[in-house]
Structures are given as C-alpha cells and as structure tokens.
C-alpha cells in the first residue's frame, strides 16, 4: 500500500447507487443488543422463544460487529455465525477469509456463488491498480456450513441411515423462501484525488457552495440532497477549521487539496429467493458502509493543513428490506442493484470497494 499521511474533513458525501440516489432506509430490524438468546426454528434459522413452554434449546448469541452475530456453544466458544434477516429471524452462515493473492482458489471454490466470486475479483483488481494492500475480504454464506446437523432434530434421518439436512432459508415477502450471503470488506482505501485552485475566485466559489450546503445540513434542511447520514455538526466544524474564510486560498499556482477515503468496514448483502422451483436465484444486492473516514490535505503556499473526519453509517435504501426487492425481481433475468459505487468530494469521485 502506498505510504500516505493526509488527514481530512468530511464535507459532503454523494453516494451513487446505479441510476438512482441513495439514502438511509427508515425501516429497520437491526438489533441493538450485544448478547441475547435464540432458539432453533429449523431450516438453518434461529428466532426468539415462541412461548414460555417451548422445549427447544436456547442458544447464546453475541453481536460480533455491525451485521454479523456469533452463535455460542455451552462453553461460550463461537460455534457458527448468524445474519439478522426479517421478522426476528437469524440465518445461519459459515465463514471464509479470502486469500487475496490466489485467484485460482477463488475460482475453484464451489462454496462461493459465481456472483460473489465476480465481486471479489473486481475489488481485488481495483485494489491492485491503486497498489494498496492491508485490506481483507470475508465471506459469510450458508454454503459454508458444515455442522447444520447439530441443530436439526434427531428424527431427520433417511431410510438409508444418513442424516437429511433441509435447505437453509428464512421466510420473507410473499411467504417465499430467501437466503442472505454477505461480503465483509475491511480497510479498503481509495486512490488519492488532487484538485488545484490556481484562481482565488474559483476556490472561493467552491468554498461558498460547500459552506452554504453545510449550513443547511446544520439547520436540518436539504438533507435529501446531501444524504441524511452526514454528521451535520461535524461537517460545519471541520469545514471551518480547515478553510475558515481564507480568501487567499487559490492565490498560488500550487494551491491544492488532496483527498482519499478509507472504508474501514463495508458489507455487501446478496439476497436470493426460491422461486418458482426449488433452486435459489440471486435477486437483490444491497450495501452497508458501516464505518469510513475521509482524509484531506489543504496545501497553500507549500504549507500543509491536515484534517480527518469519520462518517456515519451509509446504507442502501433497501438494506433492511432486501427480501421485498428480491420478491419484485423473482424469476427476472436481472436483479435489484443497490451497490454503492462512489464517494464524491470537492468535485472529485472516489470509487468504493465494488
């Protein structure tokens, strides 16, 4: 990874998702609990205790990060992983850390769906183009489960004596069967963007535009245009700190800014629906950038001013309702695409891990 030390402020974020604008979904099923208990409901899905008289075994669950939960055994060791889906259903998944240097192992891994392989290879290719390292990719999918039988009733045995294992699914929109798979990308860094301001008027026009935008955000106005997840106070504070009312910026031919973004944690969720036959079709993709940081250098007359700003979680609009989009695209030749592709700052575009 290239050596860099430029620190920054978050001024505005425009996330481009396909051909529509992004926002934060108001609908949520995200649990705020760090530790709780669930019971096995069958088909690789856990849920809350149905009744006080239920004889089903309770399992300890611990929140691992923003999206993934750990399923613990009786000794509190991690036994498996869970993804929260809809209506209090938690779906079992296995875990695999990807070897970023071995494309053959990715291509030959039959537990990875083709669409996941393609996204993994695309992310690695873009990272190689910018000569970065130090990032990681982890896959969570039911295809990696090797101990589903441990949760199934002992009666699930075929006449030949072998254990019969059901398909993993949760029940979603239209009472159809769905499954989720997740890519977890950490510490992905964009390339550095540079913009020169050789003219004071140009720099001041840019300053006034962004400053007015920040003031509207602080007042709770215009949030749809610059996305509601932007930390309004941080925008104004950091922006004033680094630029203030500096009317002299842009007065030198070498006056410029340098910016890059580090996505500390990004999740990509693939939602498949079982329709019309017994096979799954991937029908919706949504993204969740849970943590990212924007770094900036302001360079004026050769003097560098550095700032950094952490951003708040940025989710695709349908992150919490991906089953509904998958339902709309069931039996379709394409899928609903809410991948987050870009961050936009100072008129520059930075490619997200995608």
Image: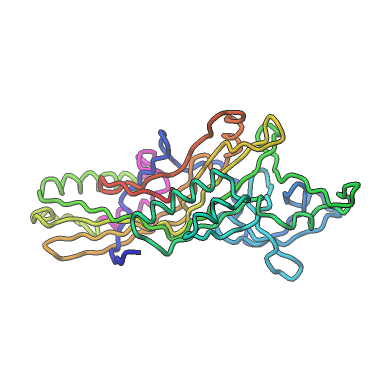
Q: Which residues are magenta?
A: 220-239
Q: Is residue 125 above or below residue 277?
A: below
Q: Who is closer to the viewer here, 119 or 41?
A: 119
Seen at 35% across and 56% down, the residue is 261
In this picture, residue 85 sits left or right of residue 56 = left
In this picture, residue 142 sits left or right of residue 340 = right
Q: Who is closer to the viewer here, 340 or 298?
A: 340
Give the percent coordinates (x, y) of residue 138: 54, 57
Whether residue 243 appears in this view of the structure is: yes
Seen at 54% across and 43% down, the residue is 115
The majority secondary structure of the magenta stretch comes to helix
Give the percent coordinates (x, y) of residue 168: 71, 46
Give the image quarter of residue 270: top right
In this picture, residue 136 sits left or right of residue 94 = left
Residue at the outermost right position: 159
Give the image quarter of residue 219: top left
Give the percent coordinates (x, y) of residue 100: 48, 59
Seen at 17% across and 44% down, the residue is 205
Seen at 20% across and 51% down, the residue is 195
Q: Is residue 235 magenta?
A: yes
Q: Is residue 77 above or below residue 21?
A: below
Q: Is residue 257 magenta?
A: no
Q: How is the image coloured?
A: rainbow
Residue at the outermost bottom position: 75
Q: Who is closer to the viewer here, 162 or 296?
A: 162
Give the percent coordinates (x, y) of residue 68: 60, 56
Whether residue 234 appears in this view of the structure is: no
* Rendered-image quadrant of the N terminus: bottom left
């Amino acid at each position: 990874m290239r050596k860099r030390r430029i620190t920054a402020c978050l001024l505005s974020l425009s996330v481009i998702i396909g051909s529509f604008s992004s926002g934060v979904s108001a609908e949520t099923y995200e649990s705020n609990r760090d530790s709780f208990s669930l019971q096995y409901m069958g088909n690789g899905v856990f849920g809350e205790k149905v009744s006080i008289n239920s004889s089903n075994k309770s399992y300890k669950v611990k929140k691992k990060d923003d999206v993934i939960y750990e399923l613990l055994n009786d000794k509190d060791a991690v036994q498996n992983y869970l993804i929260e889906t809809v209506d209090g259903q938690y779906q079992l998944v296995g875990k695999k850390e990807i070897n970023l240097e071995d494309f053959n192992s990715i291509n030959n891994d039959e537990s990875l769906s083709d669409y996941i392989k393609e996204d993994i290879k695309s992310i690695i290719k873009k990272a190689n183009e910018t000569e970065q390292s130090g990032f990681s990719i982890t896959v969570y999918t039911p295809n990696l489960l090797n101990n589903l039988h441990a949760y199934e009733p002992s009666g699930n045995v075929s006449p030949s004596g072998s254990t019969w294992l059901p398909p993993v699914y949760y029940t979603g929109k239209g009472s159809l069967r769905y499954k989720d798979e997740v890519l977890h990308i950490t510490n992905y860094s964009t390339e550095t963007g540079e913009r020169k301001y050789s003219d004071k008027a140009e720099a001041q026009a840019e300053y006034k535009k962004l400053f007015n935008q920040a003031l509207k955000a602080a007042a709770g106005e215009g949030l749809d245009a610059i996305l509601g997840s932007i930390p309004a106070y941080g925008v104004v504070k950091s922006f004033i700190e680094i630029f203030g009312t500096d009317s002299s910026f842009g007065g030198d031919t070498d006056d410029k800014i340098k910016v890059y973004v580090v996505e500390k944690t990004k999740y990509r969720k693939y939602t498949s629906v079982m329709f019309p036959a017994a096979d799954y079709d991937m029908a919706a993709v949504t993204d969740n950038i849970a943590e990212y940081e924007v770094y900036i250098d302001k360079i004026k007359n050769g003097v560098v001013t550095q700032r950094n700003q952490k951003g708040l979680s940025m989710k695709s609009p349908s992150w919490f309702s991906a089953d509904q989009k998958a339902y709309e695209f069931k039996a379709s030749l394409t899928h609903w695409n809410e991948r987050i592709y870009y961050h936009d700052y100072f008129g520059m575009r930075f490619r997200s891990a995608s």
